[in-house]
Structures are given as structure tokens and as C-alpha cells.
Amino acid sequence: MFLINCPFCGEREQSEFKAGGEAHIVRPKQPTELSDDEWAEYLFMRKNIKGIQFERWNHIHGCRKWFNIVRDTSNDEIKAVYKMGKKPPLV
Amino acid sequence: MKNKYSIFSIIKNAFSYHENWEKAWKDPVPKKEYDAIIIGGGGHGLATAYYLAKKHSMKNIAIVEKGWIGGGNTGRNTTIIRSNYLWDASAGLYDHALKIWENLSQELNYNVMFSQRGVMNLAHNLQDVRDLKRRTHANRLNGIDAVYLNTEQVKRFCPIINTSSDIRYPVLGGTLQRRAGTARHDAVAWGYARGADEMGVDIIQNCEVKGIKRNGDSVEGIETTKGFIKTNKIGVVAAGHSSVIANMAGLKLPLESKPLQALVSEPVKPIIDTVVMSNAVHAYVSQSDKGELVIGAGTDDYVSYSQKGSHDIVEGTLSAILELYPIFSRMRMLRQWGGIVDICPDASPIISKTSIKGLYFNCGWGTGGFKATPGSGDLFAHTIANDEPHKLNAAFNINRFISGDLVDEHGAAAVAH
Amino acid sequence: MSKNLRVKKGKFIDETSRVSFKFNRKKFYGFKGDTLASALLANNVHLVGRSFKYHRPRGIMTAGSEEPNAIVQLHNDSSRTDANVRATEVEIYEGLEATSQNCWPSVNFDIGGINNFFSPLLPAGFYYKTFMWPASFWEKYEYFIRKSAGLGKSPTRPDPDIYEHRYIHCDVLVIGAGISGIMAAKTAAKSGFKTLLVDEKPNLGGSTIYQDTNLFKINNQNSGSWLEKEINEIKKLKNLEIKTRTSVAAFHGYNFLLARESLIDHLPIEQRKNKTRQRLLKIRAKKVITATGSIERPLIFDNNDRPGILLSSAIKKYADFFGVACGEKNILLTNNDSAYETAISLIQKGINIEAIIDNRESIDSKLIYEVEKNNIKIFKGFTVVNTSGYKKINGVSIMELSKDGQKVIGSKINLSCDCLGISGGWTPAVHLFTQSGGKLQFRDEDQVFIPKTYPSDQISVGSCNGDLELDKIILNISKSLKEFLNIKKTDYENIEVLSSMNKSKRNIWLLPSDKIIGKTKPFIDYQNDATAKDIKLALREGFRSIEHVKRYTTTGMGTDQGKLGNMHALGIISETSGTKMGELGTTTFRPPYTPLTFGTIVGRNVGEYFDIFRKTPLHDWHTNNNAEFENVGQWKRAWYYPKKDENMHQAVQRESKAARESAGILDASTLGKIDIQGTDASEFLNRVYTNAWSKLAIGKCRYGLMLNEDGMVYDDGVTTRLGENHYIMTTTTGGAANVMGKLEDYLQTEWPELDVYLTSVTDHYATISVCGPNSKKIISKVIPNLDLTDENFPHMSFKNSNIEKVKCRVMRISFTGEHSYEINVQANYGKSVWEKCMEAGRDFNITPYGTETMHLLRAEKGFIIVGQDTDATMTPIDLQMDWIVSKKKYDFIGKRSLYRSDTIKDDRKQLVGLLTDNPNEVLEEGAQIIADINKSPVEMLGHVTSSYYSPNLNKSIALGVVRGGKNMMGQKLIIPMEKKNINVTVSDPVFLDKENKRLND
């Protein structure tokens, strides 16, 4: 059970949060101009990294804000937390 | 068979104090080149190699396994076997497997303890009832034994379930597949390993794949911790680590690897003689031959390769267990563990060719792959040997995520385990 | 049998309070402070249970939670009976009843004991190799295998006891209150850290507290007395909380730990009423100090499992702590100095020692000299090769060890005894450390695994860290604590310690025998009957990894999880396979450390607290009016309101007819409501719904369909424009939270530039829907000042109004196809407004209807229910709702997916109406639909999603999805049921009032 440092509320139990998958997958601005392949890439294909992953979390039972986390998925160690729209930190 | 197992061979060996049993499988040094290499020595990978050798006359095959055979999800799952899936494609796939299960001990000369004790799925709200009836009708028309039970019939089949109407989510009915059941997970891996080894398959343990060598759009071999091995057919059956291997080949897959937990209680005398699953309150339970209650929990919602999940999941599962079986409150959790399951967006597997020639993937089994082991191995072997899918796994190709022709067991509310 | 072996009660036993208890229905006495094990031993009872596979007689082996053999069934009461309880952990109480397990008819005469004679046929893995003939017989074999397996019995009635959870946040958690834990807790608390100290035992002090000889001294006092003073001091410390009978079960990442606090199990039954049985502590500690001590190792030799064979340290504890002699003719077998400490304790208490057998040659040790002073025969360089006695040990055979320890030499000497203590050295209890993700290193000199790297802010101290001697513990702890707690000094600097222990050890994992191994039974896992030869067999058969060997032989898989034998299994694998111990790895120690009751894990979340109930403001009214309820998500929704003698069908027919013919009233409060405000609110709706919103006038309502990004229908509902920049969206009942979450997600992460704010207001309003031809008349009575003319208040529009002083929002919207109004008022006025409507509707036979009737009425109109008529594989086009998909909008969620090669296919499953040839035949929801009964395999085209008997149309109607159904209008299809086929005709899904006349009547 992680202890997550919500950038708006501070450290809270993992139970207060919901994970939202890989971060920095931007929704295409012009979906209709994409091929089926390109659209599938956005919709379904994931890096699913073992190691340092950038991912989205939501403080769903708290401030309800979305933010990003850098986590090593091989041992679940959280390396950094940063707000949406900010540049990912170098880890 | 060189070393046939039976009560007679045990008696014979007892006279020599069991000093003369042969190795169940060898421990070979990898050759320079194979006709096909299977990455991943779990049940599915071992079965794939077994059927490649047995049905497709490919004898120069290797299985490379990072750790020990059967040490991943094969040895960590709750061993439920059933084929009562909703969609035709799924029903075809899983029932193909179930039919192989029914004779597997004899085929492998290894007792995999397939026990057709029945699997019951419970309904807790009106939509569950509709969904389970829909599935039962579809099963019947697909030739799969499944019946719908009302609450009293559920109670009669498994008397320890609390079917009282005043619990939070009362049992409104259920389905029963009598041919379904459980098997001994380790035995499946070991039985296939022994069978494959006998046909000349090299089982190479403690050998981690570090890279996939490509020549343009074809594969040429694998880089491993035991050196480079040449081949032009690679079947990847790496479960939770499928994406890791795919990334080595420059592919992305529609997968997320998530923690899935399970637990067993201390062993007690027989108290439940079937498998009961409930999707709505999320609990499933059976009792092993040893007497332990075997309980499966759900997945966490984040990607993790740590083989650990969060305690909340275990707590939620056990509270569902006590909702349905208040008599288990004083039973004690003996052991709890986690595995890494690779999940597709439609909760159905991929058994498919890829855009790279000679590279095949068998993955995305999510929380329910064990039951498919023999069928998955058989169909994947067919796909690798013929470079095209069998009709039973044609629907489970990677391209479905591009066309949108998903096999959405998840969305159709059929239980995923 | 019932000899009294109590020697001297000592200070830990309350000799003034005698306690009676029953074991196997026979009455015994012990004292307060006894465990069941110590009380049984005091009564000279060793035989407690039978082993799992061979049903061999087994006795008490240890004095702690590592006990593999002495496990019993506690209580006879079928609701409170506890299986597999360790006699070494049960504190006796008046009225305790315990019985042996896994034996029939009794532990003394167990039919299953015959298995022992068949043991040559039951090697490791035998069941994988047999029971395969005839093929169909496995289930018959399995029946008997299952019956003979298992240990204790599960309760058969619900548990009457209460469990609870407590969250603890502390600066420092100290696990284990032995000497190291006490020193650590004192240091932390005195340095200002909020500290929690827990120990699984009922008392503090571990094994040092009863160490009472002048061979072990701290600051010139006997170590036990010194520790007692320390304990008295820490009890006074303010920021230290101490919890005994509290076992840490799991050490997860981020210093999250679970501990079980046992609160009443030691009390007489009548004192337990209304008290919590166990508490699960969920501990989040900034720092963790693990001081879990070490577990003595047994020694592995032929027949090392007989009752009367105990760990040497257990014999010491029974003597020193409980004042109990485990035997009258004791022999000790050891490979290290610990057994001599036991010997000294026994000598002090006047308990007879026949001999000590030491694997080692001559050793220079103060302890040995002390024992030798008492003229006790010590066989140096010897080992036990066999034992005798069936239900209790009565003798040992010993032989001299060869120089290399590989074999025995010379002739056999037989010694008689009634108790054998064995000591194979110590294994640091690193279980919790490794659970937390810690990595181990192997220390060759004494063959132990010790912590290497810590994955979180934690340390291990004392013997669990490999400091196995008193002097080393004290020397190291001060330094470790200063560094770990970042403090300048501790109370434990410059302490004088006298420890007489010599560290030398002669470690032989499997002691040699004069017999070939095949003829011996050297047990490694006592409970599961796994022997050294099973391990060797596994290796011979090609199982190489420790995990394989463990699983093949079941070593370490009993209720003790191999706390005693796992190291020997590793050692034997290492020796046999020629792999170094450090390279072999270990099996994974999985949580929990000791078994954890399900009830404790669940706490109060059982019964009515299993999940929350969401009730509408009108819930009581429904209950008072005889409503039956349906669970929809967490909501309780009124399902139908049966009148006297009515069944559900009759009630629904009555309710539906009333709604169409005069007036019906529905509690729609559970529908999700999201308040949307901001200058970009319209643009936002354009992006999340399939249809266009910019032109919706203020005061107007519109139905919207929301898709997933994969193009499949996700949710639907009516959204009303309350103002220029203000909307209220309704969602389905079950989908409310997910829709809210999804909208927030897009808003915060994809479209942060939009000026839009979302607030969930589901619980803020009561929503009352009045429908039917008389609804207008009723509403005009309830809200007389509202102009209800079609010109002022047409269908799909909204008005703010008042009911007396209560503000309300009224929407003229309809889910039934009838003229209808939806009144939204502040939740706490809901009931009075509902009652007003009932009052106003009395003359019109206003009829409350539930969800079932609502479903019927909407089906007559062909309105879908998301989740019932759709299943996450349906696009709006599949639903024949093309009209709601804007062609003009550049983008909306899911739009792109509607144009994939599969989603544009013509022959997808499409929503249609279905009419049975026999109008009285109602289809089963979920039934499959086919065209050709003779085709094999049967081709399923789709299924029935909704089906009712319509009292308004006097016929059965159904909705279904059918492959290519759009183009099948009028076509005959078949519903193949188990016993018959039902003929149906594909129809328009709108069965009633296609022209929508009733909406405006």
C-alpha cells in the first residue's frame, strides 16, 4: 500500500487514490484524420513499462485532482510526483 | 514411454528405496540454433512446445525460462477451469481446452488432478440474472454444459452459501457448469515439461532473454544470459512480461500488467466441494485436496511487476467471502501472494502472428489463463507451425484492436476469471 | 500418565490460581500463565496430534509460534470452534476444551497410522505418478484423499465474535519485545519519538527475561533481572505504547504493517461477552525497528519426530518460565553451546539429565565446564542415529561422527530417555524483513541468512540481525540505534556484559546414519511429513530450484510455513546439488507471519456493514407503503409496490396501466446529477455527448448519449440548460460516479483550457416524476402558480418554481412516453413534496410505481436502458439511434471509433423490437435469437435484452439485439429455449405511440 504525496493535499494512503494508466498519452487533436492503426495506437497500445513509468493518478477520495507520478514498476517505489501539465522531472 | 508412472512403478521403485527414478526432464545447455524457441516456461509455453513436437513434428525446439518452469502465474493461480464463456469465439477456445483437460492426465502420464467438481457463478442483482441467463443460453447452443439455478438450487448444490434474502447483496440465482473444476497447477507444468523433454524439447531454465535479433521484418534469434541462440520462429508466452519482450522487438501491445492476489487458508477437513465464483461481490473460493480454502482476489488498478498488490484488495475479497460464507470468519489466512497478469482491453487473450515475421505472441490472458493452458498451447503451436492461426484462435488476433472487432467478455459482464 | 512434572512454579506462573481444562475430553489442571502446551507437559502429556500424511504420533516440539506438531481444535461449539490452533500459543483459561486433530478414533489409537507402514509407497510426489487408472476414477480417489487430508475442522455456524480495525500512525514501530526490542523502544521513546512496541507473547522480555544465571550478566546483574528493571522503566514512558499478544502479520512496502492484537482469547468464556475478539492494527510507521529474534533449529536424523523430542530452547523455557520438566530422563543433542544453557537451567531446577550428545569435538566453553562440574556425561563428537518409542520416545542410539561429519563410525550405544532436546543453532527470524522487500545475505561461519539491504526506513536489531550472543547484541545495538534514529547517545553505551557462550558450531544439515537413507525417516517438515530423502528424491528427479523442491515435497507448506525446517531443506539441496547456499536463494516468505483470522482482516465490514446502503429521501415512504426493493449499485430502489395478495407481475401490470391511463409517480432521486458551470459549458457538452449542444436554448432540455473513446455507448440522460453558462446533467443511477470521474478526467487532463466546473449534486435533490394523462392536473394543484400550458411549458423544457416556500426545478421530460413532469427539490423536502403529489393525485388514482414498471413503460416506447439493452459492444448506430450522432461536429468522445473497419459493418448486432407469434408468451431476458434451427453449429444472431407483458398493448413485447437486425423488419426468427422454440417477428422497437401524441396530450 503506497503512501502517495498528493501535490495538493500532501501524503495520503493509497486507498484514497485511483490509478489512471500511462501518462503523457495526448488525445489526438484531429482524431478523424488518423488511420485505424494510428487511432488504435492511441486507444489501446501501451508501453507497459517494467521500470520507470510516468503515470496518472487521481485523488478520488480527496481533492479529486489528477496528477502524475513517476514510479518504478519493478518495485513500486515512487520517485516523484508532479502536477498535470508540468514537464516530467528527470529521474 | 521410458519411465512410465503408475502404482506399479512406485511399488517397483520402493524396493530400491526410490533411488532409481529418472529425471523428469533434463537440464540441457542451449544449442546454437533451434527451429523454434518458446520464450516463457509456464504452462502455456510448455504446452506449446509439447504440441509443436507432438502434433507438428518439430523436434528441435527450446523453451527458455527466466526463472524456473511453472514459477509464474502457473504456480500462483487459483486453478479454476471452466468453459462457460459468452461469445462463440471464447466458448470455442475454452471448451477446446476443457476437452483436452478431460484426458490430460492419461495423455501426459502425469496426474494433473483435474477434478470436475463443477463451477458455480452467482447472481446478486437483476442485471446479473439477465447476464447469467444470457450466457447459459449461449452456452447451451454452443454445446457447453451449463444450467441456470435458482436460489434454492444454489443452496442445494453448495449448502454453506448464505442464501438468506436479508444479506446486503442476496444470491438471486446462479449458473453451474458441472464439467468445470480445478486441477493441480504445478502438475500441469511438470507434466508438460516431462512430456516435451521426452520428445526432445530443450527446457532451458535460468535463462533470461535480453534481446530479440531482427533482420528487417523477420526474427533471427534471441540474446540471452546464456548467449545468442539462433532461430527464425519465436513464440512469446511470457504472461506479465509480454510487453517487456515486445519492447525488445520494437512492438507495442495492447496490454497492461497488473497485480493479482490470491490466498489460502489453513487446511481443514472437506467443507466445500465445488468452486463458487461471484463477480458482483467479487469473491471466489474452492478447497484444495490438501484442505486449504483457495481464494482469489481482484486486480489492482495500476501497472506493477513487483508481484505485490495492495492490502485493500485482500480485505475487500475476504469481506465478500464472509458475506457469502459467514462460517469462515474464524478460518485463518495461511499464505497470501501476488502475480503479474497481462490484461487486454477486452479481457480476451491474444494468440497471434505479429507484423514481424516469425514472431508470435500468446498473451493477454488476464486473470483467467490457467484454464486455457492445454488449448492455448495446442492452438499456439498450430499458429507457429503453420504461420497462420487455427480457426479457433483466429478471432484472437492482434489486429482486432485496430478493426474494433473485440471479443469483449469483460463488457459483456461474463466473469473474467 | 497423569504424573505431576511441575518442579518450581517460578515468577511467571500464578500458583494461587488453578485452572481446569479438558484435553481430548479428559480433565486436567494447570495454572494461570500456562499455555496449553506447558499445562499438558506438566501433566506428562506429550502426544498431542497426528501428522498429515503418515499419521505418526506427534508431541509438543517448541514453546512458540513456530510449532509444527502440537496443533489442536479449540472449543466444541460449532460457531466458535478454532481449527489448527498451536497448543504452544494458547493461554489456558477456565473451561478450555481442546481436542487432537487428524486422527480417528483417537490420538492414541489412530487408524490412519497404517499409512506409516505404507510410507515406502508414498514418496514425495507419489500422487502425480498414480491414481490415473481408470481415467474416470480420479474423482473417486480424490474423495478419499480429501477426507484424509485437511487438519482441523471449520466452524459450521456463523461466528458470533466481533473484530475491528485500528489505524496507527507512529514515528517508530518496534517489533518484538525481547531484550533488543526493549532497548530499542526505550531509546526511541526517550529520544522523543512516538513509539509503538508490539510482541506476540503475553509478556515482555523474550527469552532473556528468564535467563537467570551468573554466566550471563549485564552491569553485574543477571541478565534477566537487568531486563526486568528496563521493562519497569519503559512502562513509565509517556510516548511509548506497548501492545502484547500482538503479532505483526505483514510488513508491506512504505512501512505499512498489519498486526493482530488478540484481546479476549485468554479469558474464560463468560468474560468475553460483547468484547472485541481481535483487532487488526493497520500501522503506518515512519521508521520500523525489527527485533523479532531467532528460532532454534532442530537437527535432522532418523525418527527425529517422536513425542518427547523438543527443541532444547523449548525445554529451557518450560523449565525456567513455566516451572515444568519435559521429562525425568532428559538427553540433549546439540551442535552448539545453547543446549548447555538449557542443561544449566535443568540442573538449577533439579531436573535430571542423562547425557549430552555434542556433534562437536572438545570445545573451550565456560558453559560446558559448568555442566561438567555437575558430572553430566557428555558425548563429544557424537550424534544420535535413531530413536525408539512409538507414542513417546524411550531411547536413543548414538554413534561417533567421522572427522568430516559425513558418516558415523564405531559402535552404536543405546541410551534410554523420556525426553530429547535438540539444538541445531539459531535461525534469525528474517520473515518480516524479507516480506518488506529486504534482501538477504548468507553468513558462512554459522550458516545463517541475515539482512543485507533495507528497502524502506527500517533496521533489524538483535538476533534477527544475526547478533546471536548477548554481548554482541548489546555491543551493536547502541551504534545501530544512534545511526538509525539520528541521535547522539543511548543508555546502552559502556555497558559491561558477560556472555559465556562460545560461538563455535558444527553445522551438519543432515546428520549421518548407519543406515542407507532410503531406510530412514529424517523429518524436515514435521507437519507435512517431508523427509530429507524426499528432498533428495526431488533433486534426483530433476527438480532443482528451491521452489520446485518445496512444492514437490510440500516442505514448508504446513501451517508453520516451515519456520523450523526450511533452512535444512536449503542446506540439503545445497549439499546434494553442489550449489553454494548464498547462490541458491531462499523460498519467499509470504505474509502473514502467523496465520491471520479472516474475521480480523475484515473487521466490522460484515453483515449490514459489508457495503454502504444508499437510500433516497423517500426511502421511508416506500418502506411504509410496502415497497419491495431492488439493489441498483449501492442504491436501494423501490422495485414495485405489491398490494395485498399481489405478486410482482400483478403489481407491475396494475402500476403500468395506472400510469398510462391516469397518473403514476416515481422516485427518480437515484439518477446521477452533475451541475455544470462555466463559460465553456456548452463546448464541453459538445465534446462529451454525441449530439450538438451549442444551440440549446436556456430553459430547454435535451437527451444525450455518451460514448467511450472506443465508440461504445457508456451512459445517457437528459441535460437541461439552466442558464447561459449553467447546465444540470442527469446520468444513469449506476453510472453516476463513473461519468463524473470520466468528465473530470477529460476536463483536468485533456481540456484544461476549458472554463468548466463540475459538481456532483445527486444527493442534494429529491427527484419526483409524475406521469400520465392526468399529470398536468396534478402538478397544477401542487404548483398552482406555474403556467403549465404547452406554449409556456412545452415538452423538453424546464421552469424554476416554488411549492409554497420551497424552491423547485421542474422539467417536462418523459421516460415513459406519457405527458410527465419531474420535480427536483432540496432532498430534505422530498418527502413532503411527494406526499403533496399523492394528495393532489388522489382523485386521479395516482399510483406509485417502481423500477420494474418504469422499465416496462419505457420498453413500450422503445427507450433503451444502458447496461441492459447495451453491453459495451453497442454503438449508437447499432441502437438505430443515428439521429443522435452529430455529423457536423468535428469531434466528440468516441467519434473516431465509429469509423473503424468493424464498427462500420452493416451486419453488426442492432437493436430491434421482437413480437412473439403468441402474444401471451413472454420471452426470457437473456434468451438467444437464431434464424435457422437446422444449422449446425447453431448460429446465434443476438439475444433478448428486455421483455415484458404490456398491459397497455395487451401483448408480449421485447427488445433485442440481432445481427443485421436493422434490415430484418418483419422477418421471422426463433428463440430456442431448452424445451421448445418460440417464434418471433422482428418489429420496430417503438411499440406504442410512435407519433409521440401522448407526450402532449
Image (cartoon, grey):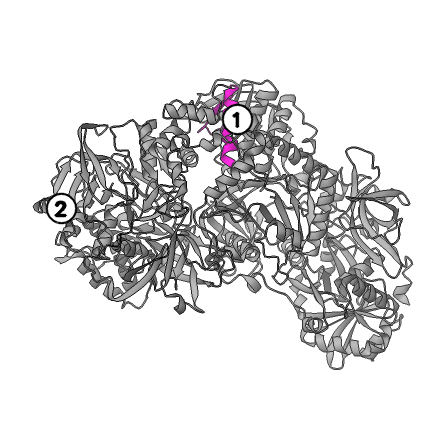
Q: Name the residue type under label 1.
A: Asn
Q: Which residues are magenta?
A: B185-210
Q: Quadrant of the C terminus of chain B?
A: top right
Amino acid type of disc 2? Leu
- Comparing B198 with B116, the one in front is B116
Given the image, what chain letter belongs to the residue carrying mark 1? Answer: B
Local secondary structure at mark 1: loop
Disc on res. B109: 1
Query: Which residue is labeled 2 in the image?
Result: C367
Residue drawn at x 24%, y 62% is C13
Tags 2 and 1 on a common chain: no
**Residue at position x 44%, y 20% in the image:** B29
Horizontal side, residue C165 vs residue C63: left or right: right
| C540 vs C823, nearest the viewer | C540
| Any part of residue A34 in sight | no
Q: How many marks?
A: 2
Asked if residue C437 can be seen in this view, the reply is yes
Say which chain tag 2 marks: C
Residue A53 locus on image (x, y percent): 52, 44
Residue C641, picture quadrant: bottom right
Direction from residue C542 to residue C156 in the image, left or right: right
